[in-house]
Amino acid sequence: MARLIYSYLASLDGYVADEKGKFDWAMPDEEVHEYVNELERSIGTYLFGRRMYETMVGWETDPSIAAQSPAAAAYAEIWKGADKIVYSGTLDKIITKRTRIDRTFDPVAVTQLKKEAIKDISIGGATLAAAALKSKLVDEINLFIVPYVAGGGLRMFPERTAIKLDLLEDRRFKNGMSYFRYAVIAT
């Protein structure tokens, strides 16, 4: 069975975007980006909400993003090679390959996807991940902590949702970021 993995870069106080919706403070340097790439190579399918999908499409549609660095070029290939499911009731058109729209997040369908998938599944977007966490579908959390306090904005984890975790791996990077990989303990 494939794992459903929630990966994110978050501020020290647990936000993935600040109160203005900005997350430029979370941009990884080359060392972190190369590490992210190693993690992402195990992913066969990405699950996105509409906003996260719209943020990510540039990896396929804007060649200047991949041209920024060798790690960016490698990530663009990883992203293009994976299947993508976008959960949106408002998105009318897909502009990337290997992508489909599902109108609603269905925990039963995601459970079936996990059973059938050969490679792991990544869930992106804090709102969508909150639904998966509340449905107890997330198996692992890959958390990159940015040495920055956002002070408010979009939280990485849903409020009033307790999650028991087991630390599997941790790492510090030269730029001050820290990585924590956790298994989600069923409760």
Image: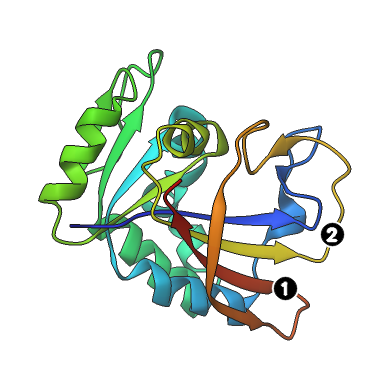
Instruction: Give residue 59's quadrant in the image.
Output: bottom left
Q: Is residue 16 left or right of residue 5?
A: right
Q: Can you say whether 48 is above or below 9 in the image? A: above
Instruction: Give residue 110's quadrant in the image.
Output: top left
Q: Position of residue 20 (x, y in %)?
A: 80, 32
Q: Secondary structure at mark 2?
A: loop
Q: Secondary structure at mark 1?
A: loop
Bin the neighbour count of mark 1 within 10 Å (Cα to Cα): few under 14, some 14-19, many 20 and up.
many
Q: Position of residue 176 (x, y in %)?
A: 78, 77
Q: For the residue marked with disc 1, what is the amino acid? A: Met
Between residue 157 and residue 99, name the one nearer to us: 157
Q: Which residue is mark 1?
A: 177
Q: Can you say whether 149 is above or below 94 in the image? A: below
Q: Position of residue 95 (x, y in %)?
A: 31, 34
Looking at the image, which residue is at 52% across and 41% down?
A: 55
Q: Can you say whether 64 is above or below 106 in the image? A: below
Looking at the image, which residue is at 10% across and 49% down?
A: 116
Q: Residue 148 got which mark?
A: 2
Looking at the image, which residue is at 48% across and 79% down?
A: 70
